Amino acid sequence: MDNNCLNNKLITEPLKTVAFHTLGCKLNFSETSTLSRMLEADGFRKKSFDDIADVYVINTCSVTDNADKECRQIVRRIQRKAPESLVVITGCYAQLKPKEIAEIPGVDLVLGAAEKFNISTHIRELAKGDSAKISSCDIEEVTGFNASYSLNDRTRTFLKVQDGCDYTCSFCTIPMARGKSRSDSIENVLANVRRLAEDGKVKEIVLTGVNLGDFGKGPDGNKKSEESFFDLVKQLDEIEGIERYRISSIEPNLLTDEIIAFVARSKRFMPHFHIPLQSGSDKILGMMRRRYKRDVYESRVQKIKELMPHCAIGVDVIVGFPGESDEDFKETYNFLNSLDIAYLHVFTYSERPNTKALEFEEVVPVQVRHERNKMLRNLSYKKMQHFTNQFTGQHRRVLFEAHNKNGMMEGYTDNYIRLSVPYNEELADKIVEWKV
């Protein structure tokens, strides 16, 4: 463990307020919300991140270079408005580059993956000083599973059921930031869901993880053959009090026919899948070290649409990966255009330290990467328009969010079409039949 805390004096007045900012994925949102509840239980009062607080906690992402830059910008903003406040950095960026973060002016504490859920103890021992304290360890030493879920932050609750990843995709730092694939037990997940159901306010739960389909490995990363993601889905469907579930993202090679068929006849799982593709070129998929070819992906989409023609399918795709020629990108574009999907999440490839992709010499110019990103974002818009138009005039069940946005409110249909309507307090946090 590296501890660089020098000559800090313990504070004499107890810290009272804390504010949080989350970068990145649904998994991070679930963990931030849990950290917030832990600190509130320890006597802290939660404040808006725009307010002055005694402690600011930034839960970081490191999927792209932008997330790293955004973290630095946020710290600078805090320094300007609240120079005496403590700044704590945790999350993936904190695990990957703790010393680099500790050198950012204004940062007081860096918590790695093994220590983020001990945040309360660390903060109590912290004072504003000249050097930042680092509490981290090698990712190989990170074991155990910390259950997390978001609450009261959004209409939907993000429930973490799995963490880490055993895949070795050549572009990805997540295994280095989160460690081996490991899961909660079905028993614990069900207990958390029942607790949320008893609250009475939670209408929809989004199952989150790094590699959800790999659910079943114990806290130490060992496989529990008696528990699978399919087993979890089946048992969740039986719990009364939760009206909706969504699967946040699942790898195509782990999305089985039995999962698709079950969702098609489920009482509570929504007709909505998000399935990472990353490239429509088998050559690039091989270089990315993905565990499938495009024909597997195509078969998953076809199976879903065969059983649920109304189902929304979202796709992750990366443009500008090293070695991606104009022909490779064209192959990806045409493949996506041919698929019956609803929308794309398009990522521009960015070099990440310690990844295999850095060794590939055929670097795609940044300007070309941005041009390809724009082309796929335009395609995504067309796909979403086409998907939505199929349901114009139909009545579908919509969960409306409580937030008032300039006199308007938003909600999502069961098949993930976003609607915007004039604000009506009676619709807030309710599921209603609504004409698209």
Image (cartoon, helix red, strand yellow):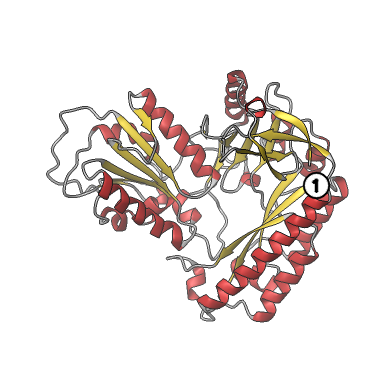
Give above or below for 344 relative to 40: below
As shown in the figure, which amino acid type bears the numbered disc 1? Answer: Asp
Residue 98 % position (x, y): 32, 53
Image quarter hosting the C terminus: top right
SS category of the residue bearing label 1: helix
Residue 281 % position (x, y): 70, 71
User: How many residues crowd around disc 1 within 10 Å: few (fewer than 14), some, or many (20 or more)?
Assistant: few
In this rendered view, identify the residue nearer to me: 206 or 85. Answer: 85
Q: Which residue is mark 1?
A: 257
Looking at the image, which residue sits at the far right?
Answer: 306
Residue 366 shows in the view: yes
Residue 236 % position (x, y): 69, 29
Residue 368 % position (x, y): 57, 77
Q: Horizontally, is 51 left or right of 172 in the view?
A: left
Quadrant of res 337: bottom right
Give above or below for 68 relative to 127: below
Quadrant of res 299: bottom right
Q: Horizontally, is 107 left or right of 274 in the view?
A: left
Give above or below for 211 relative to 422: below
Residue 221 shows in the view: no
- Identified at 34% across, 24% down, the residue is 42
Instruction: Tally the marks.
Output: 1
Looking at the image, which residue sits at the far top?
Answer: 198
In this rendered view, identify the residue nearer to me: 299 or 60. Answer: 60
Q: Horizontally, is 107 left or right of 318 in the view?
A: left
